Amino acid sequence: MDEMVSPVTVSPIRVLIVQPWFSNDPTKTRLQSAECLALGYLTSVLRRAGIEVDTLDAHLLGLTNRECVEVAERGDYSLVGISCSAQRAYPEAAGLARDIKRRMPHVHVVGGGQFLSHVHDQVAASEPAFDSLVRGEGEQTLVALIRRLERGEALDGLPGVTFRRDGAVVVNAPAPRLTDLDLLPFPDRSYLSHIVDEVRAGVRYVAMLATRGCIYKCTFCSVDRPRVVRSPGNVVAEMREIRERWGVWKFRFNDDLLVGASPGMQAWAEELADQIAIEMPGLEMWGMTRADAVTPRLADKLRRAGFRSIFVGIESASDGVLARLKKGTSAQMNDEAIRTLKAAGIRPELGFIMLEPRMTWADLWANLQFLRRAGCFSRHNLTNRLNVYHGSPLYLELRDRGEAIAAEDLSERYLYDFQDPKVKTFSEMARVLQRRGFEVKRNVAEAIARIREVRADLYREGGSETREGPAVKALVEHGERLERREADGWLAVFEDLYGRIDRDEGAESVLEQSGRGVALMLAGLALEVDGLQHHIEGVARSVSV
């Protein structure tokens, strides 16, 4: 249609907000699916405004776009909101918009989320299924948009909204950022019922958000600036409410930067940790930080509060790469952060960019050796390439310099080539070797997912006493050993690959020799997987007895 906005004549409006199912890695999706706080916050704010709203977290439930459309048709909604925060999720989000518009042309379809906020003008120009797009934080803007539609008014001048009029894209002024997050209602937790047994069994976390945005200027990041925080008391009040209602004890802070390095951010994090330790002892938590924010004092406070794992944005072991990414940290800081967390009894998890387009051959070796020293890396860390996100300084830089590879697909994240020929060869050969291990990789992930299912079943049968029982402990440790062996095996493969390329052995010889190493490693892993699967089913049988 030429006019992007579908007028809504039904008053009051009935709203459905959807997070579509998406995946470019089915095993990763199965292991990492969690609540969508964007849906939760929007739902609570709309209900507080007296707007009738339902949510559909298709990603958590594993629903296809066709099934989402069926839900929308049964509910007779007049507005459907589609949340698309991840760049890789755009094809499914756009596909859902088209499917809804095809079956329900009278419905106003609005898109939102971090990714769509960065490409709103491109989407408005290229995807007519979206009637409007909400940019930035959606709570206040979506309420205002709905009120306009209820009154039959145009969207001109509404801050934070992009739409199309007579074939031309109209971009209204940005909406102001929310500055007092304590004024927001706690997010709706309806979907927690779908995973609560797994949370109580200790195999999932409840998602939390204590801050929004970031103050740092990393070139690869598209997160909004500046950083806005909730008061520690407000955060703890929500956690207490969740624990009292749902009986859960594991929380995951999805903040892009829960803990920063400045004195003010350190003081805020210490206050939060102290309040949790005093008012809610016995929790287990996960959060994200930077290497320069990790201090012995703060690490000890986080550990006492219940943080068992901390994700650290290490990114690289090369000072040159870190400087180019404007990370504001150093290789030495990275090593010190890992040591400090381990000394405090906190397990580090790594955010790591193994392959970056302008890195040198020596930079790549430094990365491999850092992971060898750290010992807490995952298989994913070994092959992660730099993602180029729309809206990031890096994307704008590559585009302006003419170095970005043209792509019609807005979800494409690898818009570059490697400058160092050996790094390029390594990346290409590593992908070839990886593909040979896909089946074993899938089987490892399936086994880990099955452990989680069995633990949830044990909880349903025996309650909290089974959570720390010897059978569960042995099963978890067996799964962790398998994941560690998988990661260590691939590191050895890639160290060998690096050495062969460094010696200029020739592409055919390198793939042949490294391929033999991969085959041996995968054969051993396959045996380990078989052993774990037998262990899992033995424990599972005890549940049904």
Image (tube, grey):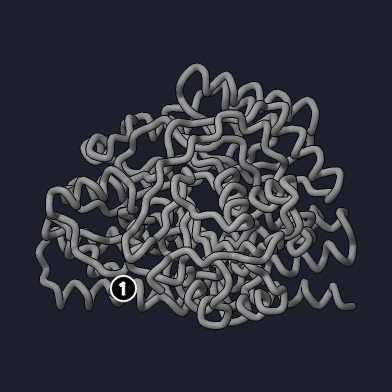
Which picture quadrant has residue 153?
Answer: bottom right
Do we see residue 419 in this rendering? yes
- Residue position for label 1: 433
Give the quadrant of the C terminus. Answer: bottom right
Q: Relative to the observer, which residue lies in front, 270 or 443?
A: 270
| Residue 446, position as x, y percentages in the image | 59, 73
Residue 289 lies, with reference to residue 233, above or below; the image says below
Q: Relative to the observer, which residue lies in front, 104 or 467?
A: 104
**Left or right: 96 as drawn, with respect to 398:** right
Give the quadrant of the N terminus. Answer: bottom left
| Residue 342, position as x, y percentages in the image | 54, 36
**Left or right: 233 as drawn, with respect to 326:** right
Residue at image position (24%, 34%) is 323
Residue 359 lies, with reference to residue 279, above or below; the image says below
**Mark 1 neighbour density, 10 Å: few (under 14) some (14–19) many (20 or more):** many
Q: Relative to the observer, which residue lies in front, 164 or 368?
A: 164
Residue 525 lies, with reference to residue 491, above or below; the image says below
Residue at image position (48%, 53%) is 155
Which picture quadrant has residue 334?
Answer: top left
Task: Determine whether the residue tagged by mark 1 lies in a helix, strand or loop.
Answer: helix
| Residue 434, position as x, y percentages in the image | 35, 71
Do we see residue 331 in this rendering? no
Q: Which amino acid type is marked by label 1?
A: Leu
